[in-house]
Amino acid sequence: MELMKKGFDIKARHVQALMVFLGMTSVYSMRVNLSVGIVAMTNASSANIQYPEINWTSPQKGAILSSFFWGYIFPQMPAGHLVRFIGPRLLLGGALLSCGILTLAIPFIAMNFNWTVMCGLRVLQGLCQGVVYTSIYSHVSNWAPPLERNRILSFILGGVLFGTMVTMFFAGILAASPGGWPSIFYVTGTLAIIWALIWLYIGADNPTKHRSISELEKQFIISSLVNNSSNAREFKVPVKEILTSMPFYSLALVHFGQNWGFYTLLTLAPSYMNSVLGFDITSNGYFSAMPYLIQWITLIAFSVIADYVIKNNLCTIGVSRKIWNSLAHWGGALLLVMLSQVSDNIVLAVILLSSSIAFNAGSYTGYQANHIDLSPNFASVLMGITNCFSNFASFLAPLIGGLINKNEKDPEEWKKVFYLSALIFFVGNLIFVIFGSGDVQTWNVPIKKETVSVENGSTSEKAITGSTGEEITL
């Protein structure tokens, strides 16, 4: 194990993390592309005027943007269980391959059918991507040593920010290019298909299934995962224990708050930039991308600091998670309230919007790592449940935002959208601070009771723990 500490070279786990990071980048490029593309699609004068303008109303645009999450919700819980048997390699690869193909169809559907058909296509994309997070948490729980977990998980989830940033930046350029707004979807869909084919070849569910990992690295990873059970897929999911766990409920609620605030900004910020601050499609892409670049850089710094704090026992894992998440959600809530007051000051509005999104980097070292803290064996199941619940917020946020904000040029209506997001951020994190935990829960390793015979012919019960097989007479 000492050899693993000398210097730094590229290991199998780093290659796996890089591939999953690129996968997350592709996943979010296919979520975000419509948020920027819809500005050009419905306002031809803001991009290449050679391509048709589509007459969608503000409520219709809100419905289209939110419809992705109508499909995204349903696979979450089944996927959390399914990935334990199929493994993240096939599930993640199949999801991106399918979603990439559907993305290529968006221009044809948008130009030849009404908005309800477009909603249907986005629902199908949501169904494909509904297995992504559970696959990633299953993969990370099997590949990331605990003292590297913040950095590896934050790096992978940084693909959310990188994909968002790159897509928002280049979508504006592509919309104004000779390829027009359809090129946004052709580029992002093609890249997803290419990634999926590479991943299906080099991805691995865990170190024991990797074809070229060194024996030293494999043993290092396996020996460090003391709370992971080699036979975890044989465990029955402790449904009762999970659904009566306050740390789990607080995790689900803070996840809901995160999705509401994040997707309000993700789906509606480009419209705010265009309608209130007056940016054209190219500038809109630049300024919409800038907050996510700042957040990505901030995330890297936060993850290194978080691992240092935990490694040196400066505070417990639970306290660390709550501090980082409070910075993200309470800091973000305050900045959103301030943003609602300065729509007449473009420079200050951009600074506050960028800062609100950048502060959200704390959530990656906060609640987003907490599923694995609570139960490494059932991390994918926990993510499936919380992601299912929280994604009601993902589709409700843009939908309600569109209903509130019928006049997109009116700053007063944007105030209501920002106030609502700030309130949900605040309440969700308050519950997490009070009831959240960073400790491995007792139900991480279900205890199975069996009746055994003893020499005198009588019987007794013994409990067999799934992690070590240690027998304890009860």
Image (cartoon, rainbow, N blue to C red):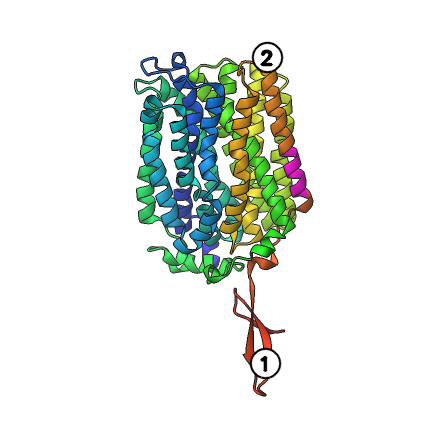
Query: How dense is the environment of label 1, judged by Cα within 10 Å: few (below 14), some, or many (20 and up)?
Result: few
Q: Is residue 267 visible?
A: yes
Query: Between marks 1 and 2, how big is the CA–CA gap?
Result: 79 Å
Residue at x 36%, y 44% (from the top left corner): 93
Tell me the quadrant of the picture where the C terminus can be found.
bottom right
Residue 144 falls within the magenta-colored stretch: no
Callout 2, which amino acid? Answer: Asp
Residue 94's x, y, as percent?
Answer: 35, 44
Name the residue that disc number 2 marks: 344
| Marks 1 & 2, CB-CB < 8 Å contact | no
Looking at the picture, tell me which residue is in the foreground, 160 or 36.
36
**Secondary structure state at the residue bearing disc 1:** strand
Left or right of residue 62, residue 428 in this image: right
**Secondary structure state at the residue bearing disc 2:** loop
Which numbered disc, 1 or 2, marks the residue that appears first in the sequence? 2
> Residue 459, which numbered label?
1
Residue placed furthest toward the right: 434
Report the magenta residues as a range.
425-433
Looking at the picture, tell me which residue is in the foreground, 461 or 278.
461
Whether 474 is drawn above or below 22: the answer is below
Residue 280's x, y, as percent?
Answer: 44, 14
Left or right of residue 87, residue 304 in this image: right
Q: Name the front one of labels 1 and 2.
A: 1
Residue at x 50%, y 46% (from the top left corner): 384
Residue 430 falls within the magenta-colored stretch: yes
Residue 338's x, y, as percent?
Answer: 64, 22
Callout 1, which amino acid? Answer: Thr
